[in-house]
Every structure is written in structure tokens, then in C-alpha cells.
Image (spheres, grey):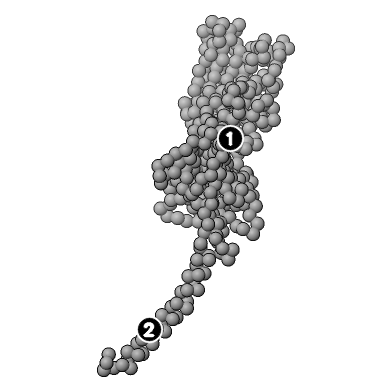
Amino acid sequence: MRRNPERLAWAVLWISFALFCTLTISIPLGIRWYLTHATKAYEAKVTCLEGTAVVEDPQHGTAKPVLKGETISIPEGTVVSVDETAQAVVTFFDQSFVRLFPRTSIAIQRMRTPRFNASPLPAQIVIYAKGGRLWASTVLRGSSPVEFRVESLQAHTVLAEDGGYTVEVSNERTEVIVHRGMAEISAASLSQPSAAAKVTLSSRQRTVVEIGKPPLAPLKAERDLLVNGDFTAPLSTGWTAFNDQGGDGGEVDGTVSLVVDEGRRAVRFYRTGGEYNHCETIIEQELNRDLPEPLTILKVRATIKLVYQSLSGGGYLSSEYPLMIRIRYRDKYLSENEWIRGFYYQNVNNNPTMNGQEIPQNKWYFYESENLLDILPIAPRQILWLRVYASGWSYESLVSQISLIVE
């Protein structure tokens, strides 16, 4: 270096110039990056509506109960869970919220806004639904955008502003229903991602995502709670068939069989030789299904045919029709009640026909109930079971399709 001080001088000069340029560029970029990406963390508020909710801090291994009517604040990373007797609401910094229905657990992954107004990035609310059913309500965002995401094992869901959404998660699938607003749903894990791995839902639409599969194309929000209601599978799929002789000592059972009648797959209820002796020939589907909230529609649809009835109308007590549909449900006060509809084609003896409806004989008839929410004295919370059956002395009737529609 002593022999060539000029070279050393030029090296120092170029190194200094390079450092100057680097600092001139990197310092403003670093400041810009910080102004853009710096965030502020928020807490959420958990309010227990029923029973006792539990909030857990996985990092410290602690858990705290939240009693009915109590509200506490929780940070990011908290897990909120409710058992089968509890419900809770989690409210976020922008006043959006999620309601947890019984047997639901979520993890609050992120609740952040940009620290500086110069940031173009949206605020973020990210929750991970571990299992169960939740209702998410988002608010108008104005000039301050908020990205509200619900993650699960099967799906990533982005919820639009000013909307109402149901997300139901099990080990096998995630179902997303848009009651109002819009949602974008993508598969959480696909071996070969594609455009089909993402769907956009608008109001009164839903989709289902299973592990390793893309979301289904948008479906109507209404759902049929019954399995094998069209009887295309063996009757043992979803249904149990049996007879109930009541208390009059009868011994003649009716029969239940799968038939094809006028090109329709159907279940046939048949009993003969049972005069002066009561019997009920039944197919029953046990459901034990919680109903969605908010619930706007609860209807029964059935395609039925009456061939023969020996009793007039609904029998002496308006309880023996040749075809009946009965739903057992639990209301919001946890009391059990029933809805019943019977069908008949003749009433020559003018028997009472409470809860009955006259339809033509030997013709297929499509029945759709009114919205049961408008007529039930107390709104149902859980459907326990549904029965289709024939009741009386001698009878022959058929059901081709039966649906229990909820939305």
C-alpha cells in the first residue's frame, strides 16, 4: 500500500461512495418499510352468554373460566372454548364479532392495525376455528380496511365487510354459509392448486370444503338435514323401521318396504287385518342436530300418496292418519316439544282432524309446510328426530321424498 498510495486512495473513495449510495437508498427504504409494516396489537373482549366459557393461554399453559354475564379482555394467541351447555361472544377492536355456539373452540391468531396512517395495508383479524359452529358479523369499514379471515384445517375464508356468516368445522369438512355479504373461500391444502381451489360466495349461498379437495361450487344456503330422504340407498342408511302397537294389546304389525310406484322410489307402509286395533308403522331418523343461528327458514317437504285408510279422518282422537310426519325438537329453554302433520283422503264419520290435511286418494301429492318458525310457539334450537309413519287400523300409504329444510 505504501508503494501504491494512489490505488489505496481510489479504493477507499469507491468503498465510501458505495456505502454512501447504500445508506442513501436503504435508510429511506427501511423507514418506508417500517412505516408500512409496523403494526399495533389489540385485545378482544370475551362475553359469556350461557354456561361457562374457558379462555386458555397456550404459551403459559393457563386457563381461566368466564362465567355467564362476565366479560374479560384477551390478547392474541388466546384459545376460547365453550362446551355443550355454553355460548360466548368475542368482540374485536372494530366492533365486528364472532358468536360461539355450543361445542366450539377458536384460537385468536391476529388482531392488528397498521401503526402509521401512511401504511396502505389493511388491519387484520384472523381466527382459527378448531371445531364447532360460529357466527361472524363484520362491520362497514369505510376508509380503514380490515381483512377478516377465518382459518380451519380444510379452508381459508376471507369475509367481506357488513356481512353475516356461519362457519361450521369438523374433522372432515368446513362449511361456510353467507347470509349477507360476500366471502372468498380457498382450500387449505391441495397437492395441485388450481383456479378451482377458490370460490366466491354471495348472499344466501354456501360451500363445503373437505381435506385435500377444492371447495364445492356455490350452493343454495338452504340445507336438508335428513340423510337418504329420497330413499335411493337402502332404508337402513339413515332410517330405523319399527312398529308401535300402543297399549290396546294388538299383535298385527304393519310392514315397511322399499318399492317403485309409478316410476318413483318410495317407502310403503302397509297393514291389513288390524280392524279395531291400533298400530303405528314407523321409519325414524335420529338427528340430534343444532339448528343454525340466525335461523330464517325451517320447512318440511314431502312427496306422498295415500292408497287406503280404514279409519275416517284422523281417528277418534285426531291421532291416527294413514300418513303422518312428526318432529321432536328442543327449544331455547331446553324443553322438548313436537310438530305433527297428518294426511287423509276421507272423513265420512266426521272425526276430528286437528293437525290434519285432506289430499286426493291414489295420487302423488307434493307437500311443503309453511315456515315452522312462524307457527311454533317457541323457536326450536335442536332437532332430535323425525318420523314418517302410518297410524290407525288398516292402511296403505307411501312417501317418495322427505326433506327437512333449514336456512
**Which amino acid does the dot numbered 1 rest on?**
Gly
SS for callout 1: loop
Task: Give the quadrant of the N terminus.
Answer: bottom left
Residue 181 showing in the rendered view: no
Res. 262 mark: none
The numbered disc on residue 15 is 2
**What's under tag 2, amino acid-wise?**
Ile
Give left or right: position of 45 versus 234. right
Front residue (pair 347, 240): 240
Is residue 380 visible in the rendered structure shown here?
yes
Residue 89, image x and y in percent?
A: 57, 40
Q: Is residue 343 above or below residue 107?
A: above
Specify the quadrant of the image occupied by residue 71: top right
User: Of residues 304 and 331, which is closer to you in this image?
Assistant: 331
> In the displayed structure, does residue 96 sit left or right of residue 237?
right
Q: Is residue 386 above or below residue 219?
A: above
Residue depicted at 56% across the width and 6% down the height: 248
Residue at 58% in and 25% down? 334
Other-residue count near label 2 (Cα within 10 Å), few / some / many at <14 / 14–19 / ≥20: few
Q: Residues within 10 Å of mark 1 (few under 14, many from 20)?
A: few
Q: Are marks 1 and 2 in contact (CB under 8 Å)?
A: no
Marks 1 and 2, how far apart in space? Answer: 67 Å
The C terminus lies in quadrant: top right
Compare residues 304 and 65 and report the one nearer the observer. Answer: 65
Give the residue number, with chain letter if any, for mark 1.
69
Image coordinates for residue 332, horizontal then vertical, percent: 60, 28
At x 50%, y 48%, the residue is 75
Question: How far across and how far down the image is residue 31, in percent?
Answer: 50, 70
**Tag 2 or tag 1, which sits nearer the N-term?**
2
Q: Give the residue drawn at x 70%, y 21%.
A: 358
